[in-house]
Amino acid sequence: MSLLEIRGLWKAYRRGGPFRRQPPLPVLRDATLHIGAGECVALLGPSGSGKSTLGRLLLGLETPDAGEVLFEGQPLLDARGRMRAQTRRAIQAVFQDPYGATSPRFNAFEVVAEPLRYAGLGGAPLRARVEELTASVGLDPAELGRLAHRFSGGQLQRLCIARALAPRPRLVLLDEAVSSLDLETQAHILRLLTELRASTRVAFLFITHDLRLVRGFAQRCYVMQDGQPVEVAEPFGSGPVPPALAALRAAVLPARPRLPLRQTVDA
Ligand SMILES: Nc1ncnc2c1ncn2[C@@H]1O[C@H](COP(=O)(O)OP(=O)(O)OP(=O)(O)O)[C@@H](O)[C@H]1O
């Protein structure tokens, strides 16, 4: 049994303004995908291809028009469209903008403690768990008193990862979670996530438009093509790939430009 299984999901959005009389915009068309326990699966696709829509459906933030999402073999939402508390804890998310995802009034301790307080933890056990989580993402627990928004983007994203791991989830959705960070910080965070996956057996769904980030990080890869995640066995191989992946490949800048920079500028 897969940890998460998506079967035949359809989702369309009503258009606004002068286009509201037109039929709804189909974003997901019969989308199917599965993630095993402890697996790291990438979902690639260009902007607007429906990656985040799929992510919101997995988090129960939206409901599909048709199809089903199963988590540990059970429907994600009950008949009234609500998620069980246990499932809510088991699926966490980290988004692109750590500043938008945290309150400017919170210090680092409060950011990480938030989900633990909801779960009823307090006092010394709460502090001990927050310190343990903070250390696990490579930050010094002595810094927990600092205001969250005084941290750098990379440090704050580490705190968001610690917060996501706090309820001991089985699956973490990483929606462009490293896309806004500089290259070195991206590499550090991807290494950290790989270590955390090995130590906690958590699964990741890694949503990104950046093909380079997937190599060496994800074990399996899907690419959004015409509203469907299409599994690609060898995204970096020389065999045929879906057009959406070919376009993402073509958009990756070469590591070594053919012309020296000066010559390019002069031209
Ligand atoms: N709530 C909404 N109402 C109307 N249209 C929406 C809504 N959410 C998303 N869309 C549209 O659905 C399409 C897919 O959006 P989505 O955010 O899922 O794409 P994406 O692949 O995650 O893109 P990006 O990488 O730019 O975030 C887009 O055309 C978007 O404008």
Image (cartoon, rainbow, N blue to C red):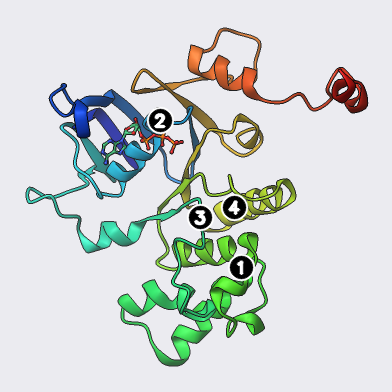
Q: Residue at horizontal 20%, vertical 26%?
A: 19
Mark yes or no: residue 62 visible. Answer: yes
Left or right: residue 89 compared with residue 244: left
On the image, which quarter does residue 224 sit in? top left
Tell me which label, 2 or 1, sits earlier in the chain: 2
Q: Mark 3 near ligand 1 (CB under 8 Å)?
A: no
Mark seen at residue 136: 1
The Cα atoms of the two marked residues, 3 and 1, are separated by 21 Å
Q: Earlier in the sequence, mark 4 or mark 1?
A: 1
Q: What type is the residue that disc 4 sits on? A: Leu
Q: Amino acid at mark 3?
A: Asp
* Disc 2 CB within 8 Å of nearest ligand 1 atom: yes
Which sits earlier in the primary sequence, circle 3 or circle 1?
Answer: 3
Circle 3 sits on which residue?
A: 97
User: Does 172 appear above or below 253?
Assistant: below
The amino acid on which the numbered mark 1 sits, given as a three-letter code, is Ser
Ligand 1 quadrant?
A: top left
Whole-percent x and y of residue 257? 83, 22
Whether residue 242 is visible: no
Residue 122 image point, x, y percent? 39, 87
| Quadrant in which the C terminus appears | top right
Q: SS at mark 1?
A: helix
- Which labelled disc corresponds to residue 191? none
According to the image, label 4 marks what residue? 193
